Amino acid sequence: MITAWIFVAIALFALALLTYFATRNRTHPAGIDGAISMIRSIDMEAFRNLVDPAEEEFLRCALSAKEFRVVKRKRAWAALAYVRCAGRAAVLFASAGQAAQRNSDPQIADSGMQIAHRALRLRLHTLQASLRLLGQVVLPGNGNRPLVSLIDEYEKTAQTLLRLGRLRNEQHV
Amino acid sequence: MTGHILLWISPHVLLALVAILMYQRRLYRDFPFFWVYTLYETCEFVLLYALISIRTVTGQQYTYAFLVTLVISISLRFGVIREVSDHLFRERPFLKEAARGSLQWTWALLVLAGIACAVFAPGEDGGRLIGGLAVINRGIGIVQCGLLVFLMCFARLLGLSWRGFAFGIALGVGVLSGIDIATYAIRAQLVDEGWMRTLNLFTTGSYLICSLIWLGYILAPESKTSVVTNVAGNEVDNWNRELHRWLSS
């Protein structure tokens, strides 16, 4: 009979999750200001420093193995806080972009689509980065792949965005 | 007994209403599987009700008819899950590609979990038809509910807005599958008649709740679109500029 109760517990957990999603399935119409201020609060230079492999290598040489693990774990937590912040902003931008996508003005709809597209990509990157940083928290001694590639990805995305923005400005002129 | 019959009839009446409303609002174009599902469930109820009312139909004949209709119903539910998943990614083809791999893995893991549960927790009455069926249905409930919870987690993590009725369909099927896991798990372990009757009441009651969810979502106005029309052009440019600035900093 205990097996049946285990399944009942699983079912109750799933139903609780579904109820949570049902109550939270709303857009964030007033969250744009929050997203912009969140993005402004992110210090990219500090983040770059936290995930810099050269910096990590320096710490590895300068500190004992035990100290290095402690410091690396702290750095990973700090970087994770940045990534989470960026992720939340990306979600807000994605929601705003999706809202704009359904606007009757085709230009706003187009801009909305581009914002949503880029913001969702950004969100995927932040999720991937979060997993990798959590990996670094659990196993700080291991030689993890540098997160600089993530920043490169951001920059590539930004280039595409700027190009699209320029094209749109030319159309306006 | 009358209460039980009422509880059995009412969700199907509501489902018929959902089917009519879907037809009136042309929603059957967007959700053909769910529309067929609502129609099928209504017809299935009429058939089973007729069979139970005819005195010459034996219990065994009724069980076989119930089994056949149940298999079709389960298949249609998988179609509905596919439909709401497609709807979620319809406007985001790049995400569809990213989600496909995760969905395939989730699907495979859930099927394995369902099979493992059937093998390692076969139930007290697994050798008999109804007991075996409960074990299979419990596994199917795990797969269906798991897929929908995964889809909702995915949408929530990425901030995807799942528009009104599509979300309602997913929620209703998710609740139905979740309750299936619990009720079929108890059915697989218990052979007691009294418990079975209580479980039947619970199943029909939960079906009524799901029908109300679908009806509620179809009648509710699309609140999100009202927000959409109020987005000013310069505001969109402002968001875009901020995103560019941050990405290139």
Image (cartoon, coloured by chain):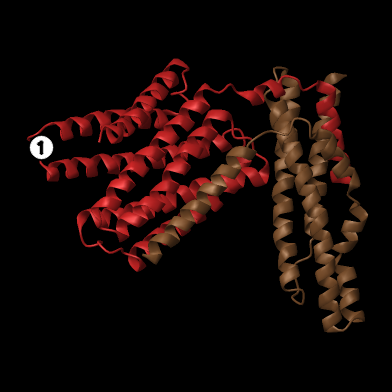
Residue in the image at 86% along x and 71% along y: A56
Q: Does residue B249 appear left or right of residue B208 in this picture?
A: right
The residue positioned 57% from the left and 47% from the top of the image is: B99
**Secondary structure type for disc 1:** loop
Residue A2 in picture, x, y percent from top left: 40, 66
Subunit bearing disc 1? B
Chain A colour?
A: brown
Q: Is residue B96 visible?
A: no
Q: In this view, does A161 lie above or below A145?
A: above
Query: What residue is at 27 percent from the left and 64 percent from the top?
Result: B124
Task: Rate crowding at label 1 as few (under 14), some (14 to 19) or many (20 or more) other CA atoms within 10 Å.
Answer: few
Q: Which amino acid does label 1 sit on?
A: Val
Between B153 and B86, which is closer to the camera in this rendering? Answer: B153
- Residue position marked by numbered label 1 in the rendering: B57
Question: Residue B170, percent across and down?
Answer: 50, 38
Where is the N terminus of chain B found, in terms of image quarters? top left
Determine whether B140 is above or below A90 in the image: below
Q: Name the spot of residue A78 as percent of width and height, x first.
A: 84, 61
Task: Please indicate, yes or no, whether residue A60 appears anywhere in the rendered image.
Answer: yes
Tell me: A13 left or right of A171.
left
Q: Give the mark count.
A: 1
**Colour-to-chain, red:** B
